[in-house]
């Protein structure tokens, strides 16, 4: 597959844009380097690059594009919003509608505030927790990514880990010292941290279903124990559901049927993003009314945004969440993911390529290793060079995966049975080639 135009654009981009990309996770540094693919347009489950090559898209823009590219209902909502003026700097009725949809789906959120990204949402939940508790420290889990705010960039999962910079430069030691990182999926580390620093901890922040060192389910009892221990220490539980909300069902991890006792895993605050904006920039945070009352104009903690709640993002989000309410939508994505996972595993096994796949409903991650992946350390132990080889072989057969061994494959409502077949054929040939390496 020839990508000379992408190479030319990459040369040009590097002269003007740092690293040639506007988010490091788009670079191909971790998959052998060189030019990333420059895309021109997307439609449904496909996008086309500037050389005219077509790809089946499993990146889904790192999560938001769950209804596929340019879904007619989402597009119509965006066009209508644009025709009525894109930004007023005032309140609108649309914001109330989206807030209600989110609250109905995620009952732990009494009140909501819209922002522009997942990073902002997470950052502000921490501010609320600090303002409410009068404490400064937070506990997070190794490998979970919570956006690029200073405080959460310590041991920060997919993006930074892919590029070998798990602890970012430019973060003052005074801030880094306010974060304690413990392993995911085991309560002992959390218990020790709470014993040592309990009365200084404002919040425990977690991706309740991890999407940033592969897709990783919490072990039975983990979230329940986390919530109990955190409360006992007088701290707040913050769920970062930027990836997980509306990914597996019309709700979030905290309302997912995989967890039998939802009261026992109810967080105090939740951060959202990605899918709820239907492919336009958005974030949101919400939680208990007394906590949310800490935020201006009601309370003393400040958070604001010129673009926050803009009509285009809100209407696109409403349209997307509406599509996701159509009967059978999630079941279909899950059925296709199962077919893909079974086929991938069978091909890998046939050619002796060690492969662990973690699937949760319509999303999964592929780890080139022979052991289970339940925490960050195990995810790190997968073979990045093998992943890079697989990524390149699939790319050249028109299958677009995230360029990182830590990121997920996302099904969308647009993927067809034929797309799954085409992907499995490409994988079969790719694994066969890898077996000859
Ligand atoms: N939290 C999680 C769990 C994420 O996966 C991400 C982005 N991948 C963020 C927060 C940050 O969101 P954004 O990139 O919109 O700032």
Image (tube, rainbow, N blue to C red):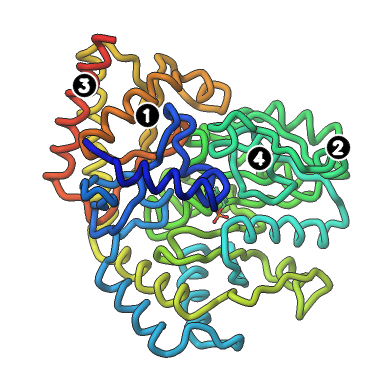
Residue under the point 70% across and 34% down: 167
> Local crowd at mark 2 within 10 Å, few (<14), some, or many (≥20)?
some
Horizontal relation, residue 425 to residue 58: left or right:
left
Reading the chain from its start, which is encountered first: label 3 or label 1? Answer: 3
The residue closer to the viewer here, 344 or 5, is 5
Residue under the point 21% across and 21% down: 346
Reading the chain from its start, which is encountered first: label 1 or label 4? Answer: 4
- Mark 4 Cβ inside 8 Å of ligand 1: no
Reading the chain from its start, which is encountered first: label 4 or label 2? Answer: 2
Residue under the point 63% across and 54% down: 267
Foreground disc of the pair 3, 2: 3
Q: Which residue is mark 4?
A: 226
Residue 318 is situated, as x and y percent measured from the top left of the image, at: 40, 73
| Label 3–label 1 contact, CB within 8 A | no
Q: How far apart are labels 4 and 3 at the CA level?
A: 36 Å
Let me know if residue 215 appears in the view: no
Foreground disc of the pair 2, 1: 1
Q: Which residue is mark 1?
A: 366
Q: Which residue is mark 2?
A: 197
Q: Which residue is mark 3?
A: 346
């Amino acid at each position: 597959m020839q990508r000379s135009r992408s190479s030319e654009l990459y040369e040009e981009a590097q002269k003007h844009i740092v690293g040639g990309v506007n988010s490091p996770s788009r670079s191909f540094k971790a998959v052998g380097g060189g030019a990333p693919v420059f895309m021109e347009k997307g439609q449904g489950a496909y996008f086309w690059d500037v050389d005219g090559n077509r790809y089946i898209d499993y990146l889904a823009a790192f999560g938001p594009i769950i209804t596929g590219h340019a879904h007619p209902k989402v597009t119509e909502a965006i066009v209508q919003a644009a025709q009525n003026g894109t930004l007023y700097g005032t309140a609108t009725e649309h914001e109330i509608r989206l807030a209600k949809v989110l609250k109905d789906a995620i009952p732990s959120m009494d009140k909501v505030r819209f922002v522009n990204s997942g990073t902002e949402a997470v950052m502000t939940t921490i501010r609320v927790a600090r303002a409410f508790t009068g404490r400064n420290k937070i506990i997070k889990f190794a490998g979970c990514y919570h956006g690029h705010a200073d405080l959460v960039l310590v041991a920060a999962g997919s993006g930074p880990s892919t590029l070998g910079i798990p602890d970012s430069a430019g973060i003052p030691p005074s801030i880094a010292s306010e974060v304690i990182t413990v392993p995911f999926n085991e309560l002992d580390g959390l218990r020790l941290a709470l014993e040592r620093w309990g009365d200084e901890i404002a919040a425990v922040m977690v991706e309740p279903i991890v999407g940033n060192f592969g897709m990783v389910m919490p072990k039975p009892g983990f979230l329940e124990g986390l919530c109990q221990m955190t409360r006992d220490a007088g701290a707040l539980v913050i769920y970062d559901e930027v990836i997980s909300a509306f990914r597996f069902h019309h709700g979030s991890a905290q309302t997912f049927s995989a967890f039998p006792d939802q009261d026992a895993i109810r967080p105090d605050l939740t951060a959202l993003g990605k899918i709820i904006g239907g492919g336009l920039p958005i974030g949101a945070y919400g939680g208990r009314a007394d906590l949310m009352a800490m935020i201006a104009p009601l309370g003393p903690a400040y958070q604001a945004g010129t673009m926050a709640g803009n009509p285009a993002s809100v209407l696109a989000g409403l349209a997307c969440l509406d599509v996701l309410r159509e009967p059978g939508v999630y079941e279909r994505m899950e059925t296709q993911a199962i077919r893909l996972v079974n086929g991938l595993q069978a091909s890998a096994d046939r050619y002796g390529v060690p492969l662990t796949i973690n699937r949760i409903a319509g999303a999964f991650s592929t780890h080139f290793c022979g052991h289970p992946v339940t925490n960050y350390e195990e995810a790190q132990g997968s073979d990045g060079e093998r992943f890079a080889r697989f990524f390149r072989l699939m790319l050249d057969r028109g299958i677009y995966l995230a360029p990182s061994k830590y990121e997920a494959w996302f099904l969308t409502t647009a993927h067809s049975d034929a797309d799954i077949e085409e992907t499995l054929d490409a994988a079969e040939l790719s694994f066969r080639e890898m077996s000859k390496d």
